[in-house]
Image: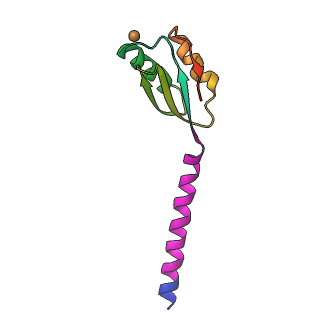
Amino acid sequence: MHKLLTALLLSLLAVFSVQAEDTPIKAEKQIVLKVNEMTCQLCAYLVNKELRNIDGVISTKASIKDRTVTVLEESKVTDEQLINAIHKLNYTAEVVK
Ligand SMILES: [Cu+2]
């Protein structure tokens, strides 16, 4: 009986530690930037590369067709950081959503 109780407690603990690991993921956010000058693969490559250099950016996806970049990032990353990175490439950027 005691063994069963211990096993139950351990599995409960396992559930709680999984939830604890999940918490930082909820601090992620996604924003979409419009980059009007991004018209070819090279532009998209440079924009992705520059944004991924920012500490806290998890992933980026540039679309030449829509001229937008979807950025998955930690909540500590500010819109200004993303926009400044794109300005470094001499492109303009505005937050779409
Ligand atoms: Cu280009």
Task: In the rendered view, tell whether residue 45 sits above or below residue 90.
Answer: below
In the displayed image of the protein, which residue is found farthest to the bottom? 1
Q: Is residue 50 left or right of residue 41?
A: right
**Is 11 contained in the magenta span?**
yes
**Is 10 contained in the magenta span?**
yes
Task: In the rendered view, tell whether residue 28 sits above or below residue 5.
Answer: above
* Residue at point 54%, 53% (across, down): 22
* Residue at point 56%, 12% (across, down): 92
Residue range corresponding to the magenta coloring: 6-29
Question: What is the quadrant of residue 94 in the picture?
Answer: top right
Q: Is residue 29 left or right of residue 38?
A: right
Task: In the rendered view, tell whether residue 42 sits above or below residue 51.
Answer: above
Quarter of the figure that contains the C terminus: top right
Task: In the rendered view, tell whether residue 31 sits above or below residue 39.
Answer: below
Question: What is the quadrant of residue 79 in the picture?
Answer: top right
Say which of 5 and 42 sits in front.
42
Counting labels gives 0
Question: What is the quadrant of residue 64 in the picture?
Answer: top left
Where's residue 18, x and y in %?
A: 51, 60
Say which of 84 and 13 sits in front.
84
Q: Is residue 17 left or right of residue 47?
A: right
* Residue at point 58%, 47% (across, down): 26
Say which of 14 and 34 sits in front.
34
In the displayed image of the protein, which residue is found farthest to the top? 90
